[in-house]
């Protein structure tokens, strides 16, 4: 996204971007290439959403949802809103 100019470079996570270590990281449609993993591997918990069950991020994440993020993310948002009342 940053290489296409969709998002500013400071939002890139990885070898040439920021290194993060949040309590929860939710990479959606992120393959988990080694250059990306270098920036997020110290996240405490990783919940990844990916259509490819063999993607590197899927093999490394704490929790995995295999599915289309365009369907899964709205479903998660809807459930969070429902629980918040
Ligand atoms: C010197 C160098 C430095 C680099 N530095 C960085 C860096 O700092 N950070 C970085 O991120 N990259 C970096 N890269 C690029 C890195 O090698 C990868 O090309 C990049 O991380 C791939 O990004 P991606 O996983 O978002 O995209 P892709 O490789 O295109 O992967 C997309 C993933 O999304 C999944 N997917 C597609 N559609 C959906 C959908 N609808 N729902 C759910 N899942 C879906 C696919 O199955 C796939 O796993 C660097 C590369 C080089 C050569």
Image: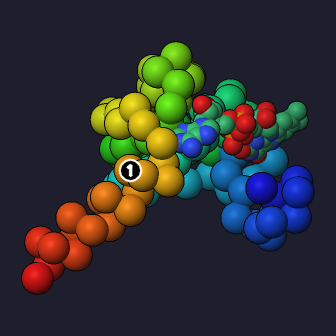
Q: Is residue 27 visible?
A: no
Give the residue drawn at x 14%, y 79%.
84
* Figure coloring: rainbow
Q: Residue at x 80, y 66 (%)?
A: 6
Q: Residue 25: x, y in percent? A: 43, 52
Image x and y of residue 67, in percent: 42, 37
Q: Residue at x 48, y 48 (%)?
A: 69
Q: Vertical placement of 64 versus 71: above or below? A: above
Mark 1: secondary structure: helix
Q: Is residue 48 visible?
A: yes
Vertical relation: 3 (above or below) 67: below
Give how far across and how far down residue 45 sits, in percent: 34, 44
Quadrant in the rendering for residue 64: top left
Residue farthest right in this picture: 4
Quarter of the figure that contains the N terminus: bottom right
Mark count: 1
Q: Is 78 displayed left or right of 71 in the figure?
A: left
Which quadrant would residue 29 be assigned to in this image?
Answer: top right
Q: Is mark 1 within 8 Å of ligand 1?
A: yes
Q: Quadrant of ligand 1?
A: top right
Q: Nearer the viewer, residue 25 or 82?
A: 82
> Relative to 85, is 67 on the left or the right?
right
Asked whether, in this view, residue 43 is left or right of residue 29, the answer is: left
x, y percent for residue 54 = 52, 17
Q: In this view, which residue lies farthest toward the top? A: 54
Which residue is the site of mark 1?
72
């Amino acid at each position: 996204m940053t290489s296409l100019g969709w998002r500013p470079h400071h939002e890139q996570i990885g070898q040439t971007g920021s290194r993060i270590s949040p309590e929860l990281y939710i990479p959606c449609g992120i393959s988990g290439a080694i250059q990306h993993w270098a920036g997020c591997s110290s996240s405490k918990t990783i919940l990844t959403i990916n259509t490819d069950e063999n993607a590197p991020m899927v093999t490394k994440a704490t929790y995995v949802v295999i599915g289309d993020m365009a369907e899964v993310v709205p479903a998660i948002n809807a459930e969070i809103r429902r629980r918040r009342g």
